[in-house]
Amino acid sequence: MNSAIPLPTRSSFAEQTTTSPATAIYEHIQEHYRNDCTPLVAKRNAVICSQGTELPGLHLVEEGEILLARFSPDGRETLISILGPGDFFGESSLLSGTEVTFSATATKRSRLLLLPRRKFRLLLEDPWLCRNLLERIAHQCNDAWIQLEVLGCTRVRDKVLSGLAWLSGKIGVKTHDGVRIDINQTQLARMVGCAREALSREVSELRRMRALDVRYGNGKKSLVLVHPRNRE
């Protein structure tokens, strides 16, 4: 099997330089509804909400890192998203009036804002915000379909390669060496649905092939997809 990891195209990075729907919504709420929000502080490993509970409102991440994960009936955990400053969660549950379908946990001390449910409903009266919210949900649906494909892979190598290719276009940061993905191996294993030990073996093999590198910075571990020209 060809183990080359496709890097994002230039158009993928061009899209990242424009204001995303999530950023537009976040900035609008910060500007117009901040005084209506309740500030929250979550300690490291604190559970902000649990799967199957009702949310009191929209959660906006001001500082820190929040992991969203789903648990199957037999207890298996799948990481579905990693959120940082400028992102938010809970909109789907608030729109549908149903219980939240994931659990949210802080990986480090984080600051959030809670926009009450009644204030969130006011956002829906603004056509511009509704359009951005629909785009945001459409992107989430696309990500969900791609992750299903990744989880459906039977070989660990396929899971890792497909997962890295997906994440490089989703959260990758272009550098002179290649594409940096700010995710550690434990998080990646939870996201692609494989054992941590199995993923570690695949990462070691990709590093040996000079297709992948592991970097450390600001107290955080990142994976770097090495550009083909730097593999020789």
Image: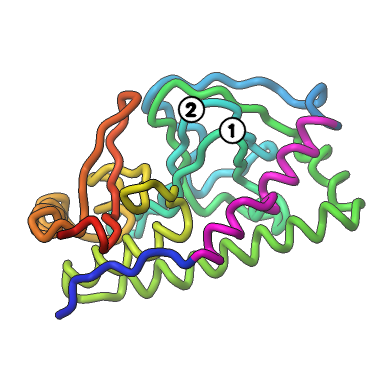
> In the rendered structure, which segment of residues is drawn in magenta?
10-31
Q: Closer to the camera, 163 or 151?
A: 163
Q: Which residue is mark 1?
A: 61
Q: Is residue 116 found left or right of 226 in the rendered image? A: right
- The x, y position of residue 198, in whole percent, is 11, 57
Circle 2: element type? loop
- The x, y position of residue 186, in whole percent, is 24, 45
Task: Measure the C-alpha gap from mark 2 to mark 1.
Answer: 7 Å
The correct choice, above or below, for 147 with respect to 41 in the image is below
Disc on res. 38: none
Q: Which residue is mark 2?
A: 64
Q: Main secondary structure of the magenta part?
A: helix
Q: Residue at x 70, y 53 (%)?
A: 21
Does the stretch in magenta take in 3?
A: no
Disc 1 residue type (three-letter): Val
Q: Residue at x 47, y 40 (%)?
A: 104
Disc 2 residue type (three-letter): Gly
**Pointer 2 and pointer 1: residues touching (CB < 8 Å)?**
yes
Q: Is residue 168 found left or right of 17 in the rendered image? A: left
Q: Residue at x 40, y 58 (%)?
A: 167
Q: Is residue 81 found left or right of 19 in the rendered image? A: left
Q: How is the image coloured?
A: rainbow
Q: Closer to the camera, 143 or 210?
A: 210
Does the stretch in magenta take in 23?
A: yes
- The x, y position of residue 79, in whole percent, is 37, 51
| Screen quadrant of the N terminus | bottom left
Badge 2 local density, few (<14 within 10 Å), some, or many (20+)?
A: some
